[in-house]
Amino acid sequence: MRSTPNLLLIVLDALREDAVPASLGADRRRSIRARTCLASAPWTLPSCSSLLTGNAATRHGHYWITNPLPTNALLGALPERYRRVGIVNNPVLSARSGLGEGFHQWKFHADHLAPFERALELIPTATSRKPLFVVLHSNIPHDYYLDVAAPYYEEAYPEDPGPPFVLGERVITWRDTDTAEREAVTRTYRACVQKTFALLDAVLGAVRERDDFVTAVTADHGEGFEPEIGRVHHAGRVHQDLIRVPLFFDLPSAVARRRHAELADTLDTHPVSSTDILPTMLMLAGQTSLPETDGVPVTAAPSGRVLVSEDRRYLYLKDRFRFNFHGRFKNMTDDEIARNQAMQADLGAPPVLRSFVADGHKLIVTSLALAANGHAPGRPALDSYAARLLGGPSVAYHGDRLYACEYYDLARDPGEHENLLSSTTTWPDVLRAAWPSAPPTVPATDGTETDLYTILAESELVAVS
């Protein structure tokens, strides 16, 4: 393979793993699909920060654009001759996000077509002396709830008798929607996905014609369409519908068949993290000296590792209210804003939601800490929050902090509907016996990271059935 192949990282915002058309990986000579890839976070800013730095959200903590993003050592591993261009379609990824540091160009485009048009302009300009690294981000699947989705619906369903159902600001809660309207929402989402891949096909056709691009297609997170159980939209929870994302590699013919086969076998048999994507692309481009990050080239990943995803800004409750810590209250009514502000006064720190996945098992730990001067301090407030959490978690009280735990067998229960820790006060013993890996770490009362089992041993336990 040539020493300086071009690189194209395509990020499709809010694309569920099960929404990808079969045509994407149809050419097995070029395309390799990961059986399981988990995003580092369930929403755009922290997840894309992980994609570009190779570090987990638990490490970089980039949940607010006011938080500085650490220097991107992974991007620095690219030879200087690479021209680095970012084309993004979500305002949270604009230059203010800090993600463009180290790129020669990083531009937000509000128009959905512009990123694809710009990519098609760039691809022919790559040369062996000035290869390209392009990040192409599209918000089309993400924007299924906005008026802009109407033309995609009409294009996808020309015989449909009615217009799409536009959720608008109700996307967070799906409030006051009936069965027919909810089905219309999912149809509109599918129309947006169809439009995305129609545009993507042209870009993939251009790089395949050149046959000198290492391309990865993935998503920053998925999307929720189960309002009956409170799993809608994204952020604020870490169920598989949000953190399991598609991942495809499209490789030039110059990649050695042995390497192609090794990568295909690994992606078929080992779950990978979104933090692994860019290290893998750099490895395929011949970069042998990479900085130490949480992500690694997938063929070098240790077997049996635990994949961790996290959110520290949002928290979904089972009535479909989504709390936003230090947020701008986007898509909230006045009543919801007032509720959000009261909840923020109660909590002394952002919520911490973490999922740990290994060997087909999944543990979710939600941690909430009360403020010393909160409106409703003490056990009554913790009881109130515990009763409103999704998933029927079993709860441990440790001072003014609660730890709510859910445990799932993903092979038997891929929809995560049966928390195996429910209905028993000895649930920590069940967890210790079942969890196949090292004890997970969680934030302690003093803000440090500590062993969950140590916390549980010192806590008052409650089983929520």
Image (tube, rainbow, N blue to C red):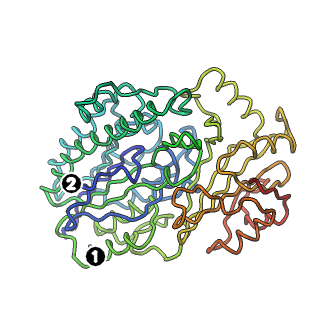
Query: Any mark on residue 261, and which?
Result: 1
Give the total of numbered labels: 2
21 up-or-down from 349: above or below: below
Q: Find numbered disc 2 in the image and state the secondary structure of the residue it sits on.
A: loop
Q: Quadrant of the C terminus?
A: bottom right
- The reply to whether callout 2 and callout 1 are in contact (CB within 8 Å) is no
187 left or right, relative to 233: left
19 left or right, relative to 440: left
Given residues 88 and 195, the one toward you in this image is 195
Residue 256: x percent and y percent?
22, 75
Residue 332: x percent and y percent?
58, 26
Please name the amino acid that badge 2 sits on.
Answer: Lys
Please name the amino acid that badge 1 sits on.
Answer: Ala
Residue under pointer 2 = 130
Residue at 39% across, 34% down: 144
- Categorize mark 1 by other alpha carbons within 10 Å: few (<14), some (14-19), many (20+): few
Residue 358: x percent and y percent?
55, 69
338 up-or-down from 354: above or below: above
101 up-or-down from 277: above or below: above
Q: Residue at the top extreme?
A: 334
Which one is earlier in the sequence, the residue at label 2 or at label 1? 2
Residue 270: x percent and y percent?
43, 72
Residue at 34% across, 43% down: 137
420 left or right, relative to 59: right
Residue at 19% across, 43% down: 120
- Categorize mark 2 by other alpha carbons within 10 Å: few (<14), some (14-19), many (20+): some
Q: Residue at the left extreme?
A: 209
Q: Residue at the bottom extreme?
A: 258
